[in-house]
Image (cartoon, rainbow, N blue to C red):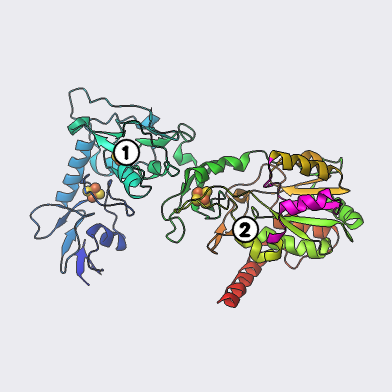
């Protein structure tokens, strides 16, 4: 294994490692534009040039491989001068419209200009004009003047999606990214090009002019669009989600996410249940509501004809608490499950199962619950076998006809309790409405299709009276002067981990 020295620090790495990677292992950041760890290496931007002793000229560190005894300098006067020259060259025709660019604040060109160049333009002739704000596809906008022709976007479409919509057309300073004739950038993963574009040349139509990036906070989260469980940054401003961006996880989604999942952040604030309601009373605090609901359940939810619906949209912690609630407060009533219906999947990330936690639900309630899906529940309701229904989540995998039948059957119930983040077209029928949080408003975890338990964290507080599912169950139990076996998130989460570990040991 070769040993080399970078900026006076020695490191031994695998043969074939690039100088840029070796430097990164030492915590030395070498500026770069065209290099991306998941793509091929064209070495076309020259921003990553470094000085290697005994080499005749500066070398692109993204391409140069390490060698035994190599001595590298990444901050020498020659390297700094080269960076400055490269930046000046890149900026020759750049419009410098940073104040109106959505990338400002997270733009490599802006950052490197401030770090290495910081000189006014010496160009006295008019700049070459190119396409501005051109919709290159249904979800992405292209700005040709900001493009530095790094070809990351072209390589993404060639090497990751295999859809090859993009190419570099023309020559010299007229070179420009274009779609092939008759094509547009329209594949299920197209918005990833906006993440890897190092400048503001590719931006999403959704996020354009929406929020300045330095105003947002970012919370690590999980996409709930399907059972893959892609890791995301949930970025938010003043309690409102602004966008999802993929978060690197080599075991799940690497650097990517699908467009549908990215846009699913819009659901976080849509159709929310506004406030607590118990029968006609909607001016309630949680302690009062809990006592009233507990009394109603004590009166009606005993004996035959009671059913509970658990959701594959809910967190593991909510489902664990729900399981104990059913035992403690609902007399071990039969449990059905609900969630989104299956959709299309592919061989890359998108899964046909559109629920983030079906595997968690199966582990917590057992496979017999997965056999009791919402369609069986509909049958039981229609034959009058259920008189009290407690639903956790309002997501149902029904067609509009089935939904009409479900509503008609629910209208005949003695008691219908809806605990959910969203109305889901059922809130008007509920005797009791208990607003719960989305995954963006609570700590929790999901188990993805591959059996990986993944945590997410509260990004902001709910605007309504919503509580996490587990907390709703704890409060209702207290309303009946009972205690569940946990009273806080930590003990519940610990119990979940112990249960998951035991299940894995048993399966090995
Ligand atoms: S649009 Fe962005 S990613 Fe594509 S070549 Fe230009 S700068 Fe690079
Ligand atoms: S593949 Fe699934 S989990 Fe990943 S971003 Fe798309 S919808 Fe979300
Ligand atoms: S990052 Fe090395 S040449 Fe572009």
Q: Residues within 10 Å of mark 2 (few under 14, many from 20)?
A: many
Cβ at disc 1 under 8 Å from ligand 1: yes
Q: Can the viewer see residue 483 in this picture? A: no
Q: Secondary structure at mark 1?
A: strand
- The local crowd at label 1, few if under 14, some if 14 to 19, many if 20 or more residues have their Cα within 10 Å, is many
Q: Is mark 2 within 8 Å of ligand 2?
A: no
The disc label shown at residue 8, or none: none
Reading the image, the residue beneath label 1 is 166
**Residue 139 placement, left or right of 478:** left
Element under disc 2: helix
Residue positioned 55% across, 77% down in the render: 508
- Quadrant for residue 24, please give it: bottom left
Q: Is residue 354 above or below residue 170?
A: below
Q: Earlier in the sequence, mark 1 or mark 2?
A: 1
Task: Name the residue located 81 percent from the left edge and 60 percent from the top edge.
Answer: 477
Q: Position of residue 241 (x, y in %)?
A: 56, 42
- Residue 440: give x, y in percent of width and height: 59, 49
The image quadrant where one finds the N terminus is bottom left
The stretch in magenta equals 370-399
User: Residue 14, position in %: x, y?
Assistant: 25, 69
Q: Is residue 378 magenta?
A: yes
**Residue 118 rendering spot, x and y as whole percentages:** 25, 38
* Residue most extreme to the top: 126
Residues at marks 1 and 2, CA–CA distance in whole angstroms: 37 Å
* Residue with the mark numbered 2: 358
Count every numbered label the image shows and give the total: 2
């Amino acid at each position: 294994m070769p040993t080399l020295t970078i900026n006076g620090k020695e490191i031994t790495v695998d043969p074939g490692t690039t100088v840029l990677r070796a430097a990164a292992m030492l915590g030395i950041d070498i500026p770069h534009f065209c290099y991306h760890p998941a793509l091929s290496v064209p070495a076309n931007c020259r921003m990553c040039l470094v000085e290697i002793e005994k080499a005749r000229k500066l070398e692109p560190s993204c391409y140069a491989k390490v060698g035994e005894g190599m001595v590298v300098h990444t901050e020498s006067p020659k390297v700094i001068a080269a960076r400055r020259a490269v930046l000046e060259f890149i900026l020759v025709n750049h419009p410098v419209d940073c104040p109106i660019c959505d990338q400002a604040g997270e733009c490599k060109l802006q950052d490197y200009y401030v770090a290495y160049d910081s000189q006014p333009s010496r160009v006295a002739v008019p700049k070459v004009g190119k396409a501005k704000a051109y919709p290159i596809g249904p979800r992405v906008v292209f700005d040709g003047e900001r493009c530095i022709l790094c070809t990351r976007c072209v390589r993404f479409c060639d090497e990751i999606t295999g859809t090859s919509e993009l190419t570099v057309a023309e020559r010299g300073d007229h070179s420009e990214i274009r779609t092939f004739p008759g094509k547009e950038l329209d594949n299920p993963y197209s918005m990833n090009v906006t993440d890897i574009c190092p400048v503001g040349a590719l931006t999403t139509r959704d996020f354009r002019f929406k929020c300045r990036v330095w105003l947002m906070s970012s919370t690590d989260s999980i996409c709930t669009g399907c059972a893959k469980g892609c890791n995301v940054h949930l970025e938010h401003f003043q309690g409102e989600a602004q966008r999802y961006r993929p978060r690197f996880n080599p075991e799940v989604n690497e650097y990517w996410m699908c467009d549908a999942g990215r846009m699913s952040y819009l659901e976080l604030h849509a159709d929310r249940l506004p406030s607590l309601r118990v029968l006609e009373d909607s001016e309630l605090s949680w302690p009062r509501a809990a006592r009233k609901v507990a009394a109603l359940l004590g009166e009606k939810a005993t004996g035959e004809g009671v059913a509970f619906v658990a959701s594959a949209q809910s967190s593991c912690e909510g489902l664990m608490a729900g399981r104990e609630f059913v035992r403690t407060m609902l007399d071990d009533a039969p449990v059905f499950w609900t969630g989104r219906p299956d959709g299309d999947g592919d061989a890359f990330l998108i899964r046909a199962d559109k629920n983030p936690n079906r595997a968690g639900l199966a582990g917590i309630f057992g496979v017999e619950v997965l056999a009791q899906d919402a369609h069986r529940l509909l049958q039981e309701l229609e034959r009058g076998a259920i008189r009290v229904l407690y639903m956790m989540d309002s997501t149902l995998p029904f067609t509009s006809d089935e939904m009409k039948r479900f509503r008609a059957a629910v209208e005949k119930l003695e008691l219908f309790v809806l605990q959910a983040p969203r109305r889901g077209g059922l809130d008007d029928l509920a005797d009791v409405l208990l607003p719960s949080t989305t995954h963006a408003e609570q700590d929790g975890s999901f188990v993805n299709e591959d059996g990986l338990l993944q945590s997410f964290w509260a990004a902001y507080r709910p605007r309504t009276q919503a509580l996490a599912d587990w907390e709703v169950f704890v409060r209702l139990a207290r309303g009946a002067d009972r205690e569940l076996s946990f009273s806080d998130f930590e003990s519940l989460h610990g119990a979940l981990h112990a249960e998951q570990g035991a299940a894995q040991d048993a399966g090995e």
